Image (spheres, rainbow, N blue to C red):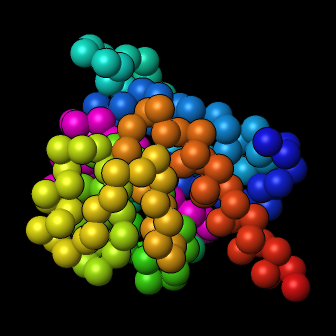
Amino acid sequence: MDTKKLQHIKIAIIATDGFEQSELTEPKRLLEKAGAAVDVIAPEGDEIKGWEHADWGGKVKVDVTLDKADASRYDAIVIPGGVINPDKLRLDRRAIDFIRQFAAQSKPIAAICHGPQMLIEADLVRGRQVTSWLSLQTDLKNAGAQWHDREVVLDGNLITSRKPDDIPAFVAALSSTLALQEHRKAS
């Protein structure tokens, strides 16, 4: 990946304790490698703890707490999965409102695995094409989405993927979307 492709881009990753380790750390690493500035945003605290396979994983530093986060300062948002992460975040109105701000500004919203639960809660999937972890397909369909079993699905500003194996395609889709937006701004 071109190390300067996203050099003027700032991305928010919203998560809390119980995020799927690889679905936060690997997109963050790849996006930073492409030149983006990436902030981890959480409801509170200095760090959050991941979930890796069947047990607690490593800790990740929180850059901005949700009460100080401003969607207008970011070009996109990433929502990692994990069963615990979106289930906790979807109960926090501030998290839902933060995601809705990205939608209102037509900025890319990228959700992987169980992350699309947040899109349901924010009422952003009705009439949209999405994918997710297999067990969420009925929830997404009931919320009005058209669900597909593909590694990545793009529908306007929504970018969704199914699982950790899809991370390269997920990040490539987000990076291409952001690079295209930057090119349009410069034209």
Position of the N terminus by quadrant: top right
Position of the C terminus by quadrant: bottom right
Is 88 covered by the magenta stretch? yes
* The image quarter in which residue 143 lies: bottom left
**Magenta residues, as a range?**
73-93
Viewer-nearest residue: 35 or 93:
35
Q: Residue at x 47, y 32 (%)?
A: 165
Please, is residue 56 above or below residue 19 in the view? above
Residue 107 picture location, percent across and down: 54, 74
Please, is residue 106 above or below residue 111 in the view? below
Please, is residue 17 above or below residue 148 in the view? above
Is 42 covered by the magenta stretch? no
Q: Is any part of residue 64 visible from this angle?
A: no
Side (left or right) of 2 relative to 53: right
Residue 61 picture location, percent across and down: 51, 31
Viewer-nearest residue: 166 or 95:
166
Side (left or right) of 100 relative to 172: left
Q: Residue at x 82, y 54 (%)?
A: 5
